[in-house]
Image (tube, rainbow, N blue to C red):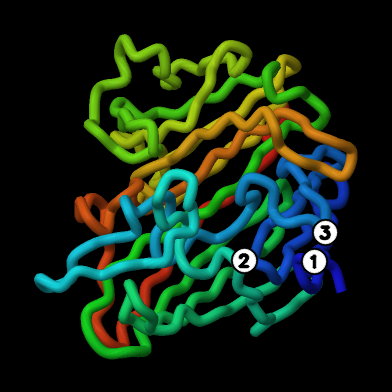
Amino acid sequence: MPATGAQHVLHLDGEHGPVTAVVADLAASLRRVRVGGTDIVQDYGADALPSGASGIVLVPWPNRVRDGRWTLEGATQQLDLTEPAKGNATHGLLRNTGYHVTDRADAAVTLSATAFPQHGYPFHLDVSVRYALTAAGIDVAYGVRNVGEGRAPFGIGSHPYLRVGDTAMRDLVVTVSGDRLLETDERSLPVREVPVEGTGRDLRAGAPLRDLDLDTAYTGLETVDGRVRHRLAAPGGSAVELAADPVFAWVQVFTNDVYDTDDGRIGAVAVEPMTCPADALNSGRGLLHLEPGEAWEAGWSLTLLHP
């Protein structure tokens, strides 16, 4: 058994050749997507922990909670500090949990897990993630149900590292329509929300990654044909588009120059759809809520675009 659990291999005959994907049990991680021979998701290897949180599902909060501490109805909640170097609780409660298969087909798989009540988060959520191949990529659909007592606050996101075939990360151009971003402190926690103009991190017209060092959350995203859309483009014109339901009103772009693969370290870029930004349990910004018995669904997709 690989270190990341069972590897679920999906296959579909698409319009530009075979479409394949690999999903791991650990954190329901999206390990690989290939469209007609072009990789659009960076693989980290089955026997290694997800490099830089690669491909994992972030629930019931994405990103960080300051000091792992927040307040619920006047009572202080203390989460485990899973980023001890910065003193934060990071990327939710299921990043080290093995999901199990609840539905399977040749081109699709649904993985499910439970976030049990615990110190710092006294709520009981059932979580599902469905990956389904399309003719030019993959659809990702989340389901969250409150199976406990009390109105449960939550957020969700994912941490895919995208690629366009063999093009090096620093040769790619990233486009994000957000007109505002979050400035952060030395602990990667939000300080203020500012317009993107003049920050050197305005991605609206497309920005080469060659000279950018990003770990930045964007919002004020433009909706096109019912979805917010982000793009990573190679010099030849091929591109990968991440299109998300509007509830994913935030996206984190992270350039990682020490991404570990089976062949050594490379540069990789994560484009992370999120329903809320860092520290949302404290700020309330973008935070969702579920009443007991209530369910929620939303999703996003990756598509390879040809010139």
Q: Position of residue 101 (x, y in %)?
A: 69, 81
Q: Position of residue 112 (x, y in %)?
A: 58, 78
Q: Position of residue 80 (x, y in %)?
A: 42, 66
Q: Is residue 116 above or below residue 221?
A: below
At label 3, which amino acid type do we have? Answer: Ala
Point 71% across, 28% down: residue: 267
Q: Which picture quadrant has residue 65?
A: bottom left
Q: Which picture quadrant has residue 293?
A: bottom left
At label 1, which amino acid type do we have? Answer: Ala
- Could you give the CA–CA distance between mark 2 and mark 1, rounded to whole angstroms? 12 Å
Nearer to us of marks 3 and 1 is 1
Which residue is at the front of the view, 296 or 186?
A: 186
Q: Earlier in the sequence, mark 3 or mark 2?
A: 2
Residue indicated by mark 1: 3
Q: Is residue 129 above or below residue 40?
A: below
Q: Is residue 150 above or below residue 40?
A: below
* Whether residue 302 can be seen here: no
Number of dots carrying numbers: 3
Residue indicated by mark 2: 27
Q: Position of residue 29 (x, y in %)?
A: 66, 60
Which residue is at the front of the view, 299 or 154?
A: 154
- Could you give the CA–CA distance between mark 3 and mark 1, rounded to whole angstroms? 6 Å
Q: Earlier in the sequence, mark 2 or mark 1?
A: 1
Find numbered disc 1 in the image and state the secondary structure of the residue it sits on. loop
Find numbered disc 3 in the image and state the secondary structure of the residue it sits on. loop
Residue indicated by mark 3: 46
Q: Residues within 10 Å of mark 1 (few under 14, many from 20)?
A: some
The quadrant of the rendering that contains the C terminus is: top right
Side of 191 where 113 appears, left or right: right
Q: Is residue 199 above or below residue 176?
A: above
Point 79% across, 69% down: residue: 8
